[in-house]
Image: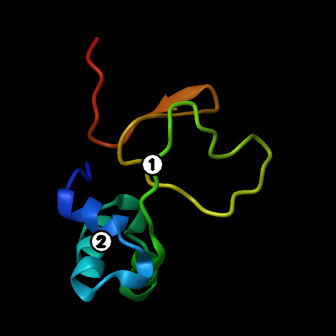
Amino acid sequence: MYLNNALFYQSLSKNPKDRKEDDLNVIYNNLRKLDIFNCLNDAPLRVVCQTARLERHHTNHVLFRKGQSATCWYILLSGSVYMNKQIYMPIGWYVFI
């Protein structure tokens, strides 16, 4: 599922403390479409929606280093990530050669 929705980005861009119920519903409806959240009941997913935030990073920015403990996790909306000698792109992005 490719999450390229202006309202979703707008809602995620808001400070979590400033989000209204409509923002939380937009975030919830988009995250619910992702396979990773299939096993999550509504209440825990709503908590994720309350704390999720949009981050933008420059090219070659390092999110984690090998062996480092992760304190959060990411959903890639655009761009690519190089990890374990492979390049990962958001679901729905295709490369034609």
Per the image, label 1 sits on a secondary structure element best described as loop
Q: Is residue 76 left or right of residue 10?
A: right
Q: Position of residue 21 (x, y in %)?
A: 26, 87
Front tag of 2 and 1:
1
- Residue depicted at 19% across the width and 64% down the height: 7
The three-letter code of the residue at mark 1 reads Arg
- Residue depicted at 76% across the width and 56% down the height: 69
Per the image, label 2 sits on a secondary structure element best described as helix
Q: Is residue 42 left or right of residue 57?
A: left
- Residue depicted at 23% across the width and 73% down the height: 26
**Colour mode of the rendering:** rainbow
Q: Position of residue 83 (x, y in %)?
A: 60, 34
- Residue depicted at 55% across the width and 27% down the height: 86
Residues at badges 2 and 1 in contact (C-beta under 8 Å)? no
Badge 1: few (under 14), some or many (20 or more) residues near its Cα, within 10 Å? few
Q: Is residue 1 visible?
A: no
**As drawn, 33 above or below 3:** below
Q: Is residue 96 left or right of residue 61?
A: left
The three-letter code of the residue at mark 2 reads Ile
Q: Residue furthest right?
A: 67
* Cα–Cα gap, marks 2 and 1: 17 Å
**As drawn, 41 above or below 96:** below
Q: Is residue 86 visible?
A: yes
Q: Position of residue 18 (x, y in %)?
A: 37, 82
Residue corresponding to mark 1: 56
Q: Position of residue 74 (x, y in %)?
A: 51, 55
Q: Earlier in the sequence, mark 2 or mark 1?
A: 2
Badge 2: few (under 14), some or many (20 or more) residues near its Cα, within 10 Å? many
**As drawn, 32 above or below 18:** above
Residue corresponding to mark 2: 27
Quadrant location, the C terminus:
top left
